[in-house]
Amino acid sequence: MPENRTPTSPASSRGLRYWWRLLLDRVVTVLTVLCAVLVLAPLVAIFAYLVYRGIGALNWAFLTQTPKPVGELGGGMANAMVGSAIILGIASVIGVPLGIGSGIFLAEHGNQRFAQLVRFTADVLNGVPSIVTGIAVYSLVVLQQKHFSGFAGGVALGIMMVPTITRTTEEMLLMVPNIVREASLGLGIPRWRTTLSVVLRTATSGVITGIMLAFARVAGETAPLLFTAFGNQFWSLKLNQPMAALPLQIYVYAISPFDDWHRQAWAGALMLIVLIVGAVAAVRVATSRGMVRGAA
Amino acid sequence: MTRTRFQLGLDELKEKLLRMGGLAEQAVDRAIEAYGSRDPEASEKVFRGEQSINMVEREIDELALDLLAMQQPVAVDLRFILAVIKVNADLERVGDQAVNIAERARDLAGLPAVELPADIPRMAATATGMVRQALEAFIRADADLAQQVLGSDNSVDRMKREIEAAMMAQMKQSPASARQALDTLLIARNLERVADHGTNIAEDVIFWVRGADVRHLGPGTPATPLP
Amino acid sequence: MGVGMEARNLNAWFGPAQVLHGISMDMAANQVTAIIGPSGCGKSTFIRCLNRLHETVPGARVEGKVQVGGNDIYGRSVPAVEVRRRVGMVFQKPNPFPTMSIYDNVAAGLKLNGFRNRRELDQIVEHSLCQAALWDEVKDQVKKKSGASLSGGQQQRLCIARALAVAPEVLLMDEPCSALDPISTSKIEELVFELKKDYTVVIVTHNMQQASRVADFTGFFLLGYLVEFDRTERVFTNPADKRTEDYVTGRFG
């Protein structure tokens, strides 16, 4: 059909079909761009609004001081930020090894009955509401220890990280082409070493993405911390004591009747986003520097 | 995979070689006829025929070279092409021998006729018969038939020695007819070479068909395959 | 130095399907043995039985004996990992470890097996890359350049260097040139000719001209059977079996 070739004839002699196809092409392009914009718009809007509302209360005092008693102005969320960091640290220590380990297990033995059970369990766990996880950890850890603790908070968040990390790790490992495994086995490298040092290493970038996804998700969870870390108005770095966390603090301040606390809640929310994005970016930079240059 | 293009090339090669064989046989027959009829015109025919023989020889060599270069033949196909190249050379030599015989015949035609105790026609029949049989073996890819040709070489050698002895004696006894005797002796030698070429052709057929190199081993050696 | 390898009555299955039937073959020391045959004839399966890689496929099974220097690699107490150190392999598609540098690729077989001596590793890496005719091209960038950033032919030579670094006695090559251009192919064929001084080489190829250029001995496989095995000259000038002749002359493929 003449219209299929690059038009060399004058425009006036090109058929109607040509112009119709051109129009269709442009319309679809515009639609897809619009979709992208619609997706990004709420994110940008939220962030902009946070900045607008929170930037006012963001000052040095906010970042370094603990909350002041009710009625007094000022104070900050320093303890909540540090507390969140500690709790997330514990969560990672629990969630990352368990998640990667299960992911490796599923990738290597995925066809066995037990593995299918594990996979099913992970998917179910993924869907459990976070508040239910919180209650579960409450009865398993808090009640045993007879007090709220940062440790329990870490356990709850850690459990929530596991399914995401497991499934992503499994997917990334399965995406490593089999010839890489065979190359390693062919050198006389034992299977376990092949999996850890070759296959996992090849999938590192994807696995880290999975970890970051899980991290970002649990960093903002409030409900499970209600029953475990409980929150703390004072500095507390002890793992077996109630610990402050940013989401908790934001929640408490947000539902309070005080304007000053509302402003600080906005600042807290802004800080939460900034800290999460910052953590993910830092990990990306650190791991990309570790990779060999020139890799295709 | 049938390698049609290659097969067509092989068929063409075979056809050309057979035509070459026909031309060569015809040349020898005509030369012997020139000897028998003492007709110089018959010799001329042989000289003129030489050109076609040379042309076909070149064509065959060219085609064989092309097939080797472009089709990378192996095993039986490779042996076939190698055999064709060698048979080609042998047949061209047969043509040369025919020219030599025709020259001797023309010489004899210009000399007084002398009755000589040399049965040239019989020797010629045996020699050309060998060439014919070898070519027949080639057409039929029959190594056993080719093997038989190897056996006939002895009788031709014997005939040559007989004629040689008779002609030498003739030259001593009646020097007047020395030249005729000499010409006849030379014709006998030419015919012996024709028979040799027939043997070569038969050996090449055996090499092609059985992959056995039986050259220079004598007729009694069984054709064993290459180690 | 290479050692000889003998297969005796080797049978192999993928699940219920038998793909190799009673293969018995000698691969002489310091010689190149080629294995040819049409697609699906079992040549890749056979070579993967020689370094016990076939059994890593779920459901795959091997029966029979394969001796390397007199020891049966399928012996009861012989660990597969040990076999694969003595019998190296180069695959059809060049497969350098994608996240490792050239140096790390070559050293992988040693480092991941606990080898620690830095200076010796440097020497071994250089020597292996020299043996694979790759050293001159990459010597300034072994630690900086990634294995995956080389050209196809270079990648394959890297894989050869990697396999040689663990000092195997036998080198198996599964259609090593089929993904390469003719010049790279010819470089690797030259390499094989050099390598046989120190190693025994078994090469699977679907390119008969390659087998005839490179190999001392050639085995013809058909439908899981070894139809003919002889010196390469014999197979390509006057094979004993009609099926072999039909295959090498291209009457079927």
Image (cartoon, helix red, strand yellow):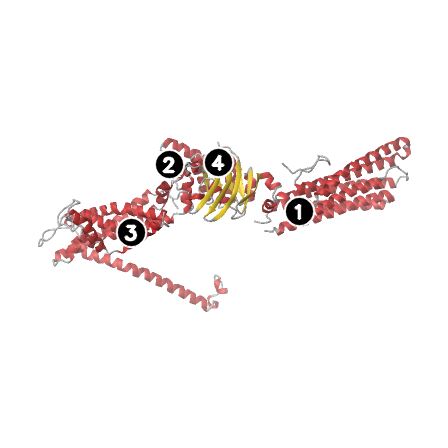
**Chain of residue at mark 2:** C
Identify residue for label 4: C67
Q: Mark 4: which secondary structure? A: strand
Q: Which mark is residue B216?
A: none
Q: Looking at the picture, which amino acid does disc 3 mark?
A: Pro
Q: Mark 2: which secondary structure? A: loop
> Mark 2 or mark 4, which is nearer to you?
4
> Mark 1 or mark 3, which is nearer to you?
3
Q: Which mark is residue C113?
A: 2
Residue nearest the viewer, comparing C198 with C83: C83
Q: Position of residue C16 (x, y in %)?
A: 46, 49
- Mark 4, Cα crowd under 10 Å, few <14 / some 14-19 / many 20+, is some
Question: What is the CA distance from the residue labelled 2 to the residue labelled 4?
Answer: 24 Å
Q: Looking at the picture, which amino acid does disc 1 mark?
A: Leu
> Mark 1 or mark 2, which is nearer to you?
2
Q: Looking at the picture, which amino acid does disc 4 mark?
A: Gln
Q: Residue at x 42, y 39 (%)?
A: C80
Q: Is residue A71 above or below residue B202?
A: below
> Mark 1 or mark 4, which is nearer to you?
4
Identify residue for label 3: A163
**Chain of residue at mark 3:** A
Q: Residue at x 63, y 46 (%)?
A: B67
Identify residue for label 1: B63
Q: Looking at the picture, which amino acid does disc 2 mark?
A: Asn
> In the visual, does B83 lie left or right of A204?
right
Question: What is the CA distance from the residue labelled 2 to the residue labelled 3?
Answer: 32 Å
- Mark 1, Cα crowd under 10 Å, few <14 / some 14-19 / many 20+, is some
Q: Mark 1: which secondary structure? A: helix
Lower sequence index among marks 2 and 4: 4
**Chain of residue at mark 4:** C
> In the visual, does B6 lie left or right of C138?
right
Q: Are marks 3 and 4 in contact (CB under 8 Å)?
A: no
